[in-house]
Image (spheres, rainbow, N blue to C red):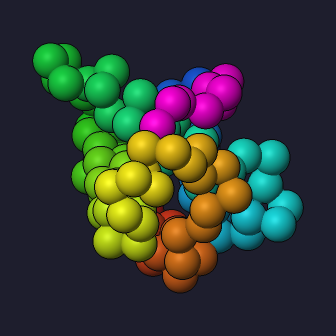
Amino acid sequence: MKPSAPVELPFTRESVLKMLTWGANPEASPYSHKQIAEWCDRFWCQYLDVDAEPEIEGLLPILTDVETQWDLFLANTYTLEELRDNDFEAEQMPKDWFNDWLRQLA
């Protein structure tokens, strides 16, 4: 599966809240759930070998969960062949998951 066009938002708490809000309301989002998950992964990867400030440190478990749940959602929904062949730009995780992640950050 090839990556989507990357989301060009800064890696901040405000951007995380915006991305999760878009995930919870995909009909109003300029980005797919795939793009949101990939952005969360890129954000998290910025802090693999770096000590993050407390505000960022608190975001990392949510960022990891978004990306992990995306992968698990696809793996549990599609065959290996479908995973290789499809782009999943139109695929959506349950909106409730995004609402739960937003509540965890409140």
Picture residue at 37% right of the left edge, 63% below the top = 79
Image quadrant in which you'd find residue 92: bottom right
Instruction: Give 59 or 24, whichever is nearer the viewer.
Output: 24
In the figure, residue 6 lies in which quadrant?
top right
Residue sitting at 66 percent across and 49 percent down? 89
Instruction: Establish if 15 lies above or below 71.
Output: above
| Relative vertical location of residue 22 with respect to residue 34 in this rendering, above or below | below
Q: Residue furthest right?
A: 28
**What percent of the width, then of the height, locates residue 44?**
33, 34
Q: Total label count?
A: 0
Q: Which residues are magenta?
A: 1-8
- Residue 28 seen in the figure: yes
The picture places residue 54, in percent across and down from the top left corner, at: 27, 38
Residue 1 is situated, as x and y percent measured from the top left of the image, at: 46, 37
Q: Residue furthest bottom?
A: 96
Q: Is residue 2 magenta?
A: yes
- Horizontal side of 49 relative to 11 (left or right) equals left
Q: Where is 42 relative to 61, above or below?
A: above
Type of secondary structure dominating the magenta stretch: loop
Instruction: Report if residue 77 lies within the magenta region.
Output: no
Q: Position of residue 48 (x, y in %)?
A: 19, 24
Residue sitting nearer the eye, 69 or 47 = 69
Direction from residue 96 to residue 83 in the image, left or right: left
Q: Is residue 61 left or right of residue 16?
A: left
**Residue depicted at 43% across the width and 44% down the height:** 84
Q: Is residue 63 left or right of residue 53?
A: right
Q: Is residue 9 visible to us here?
A: no
Instruction: Name the residue at 32% across, 71% down.
Output: 76
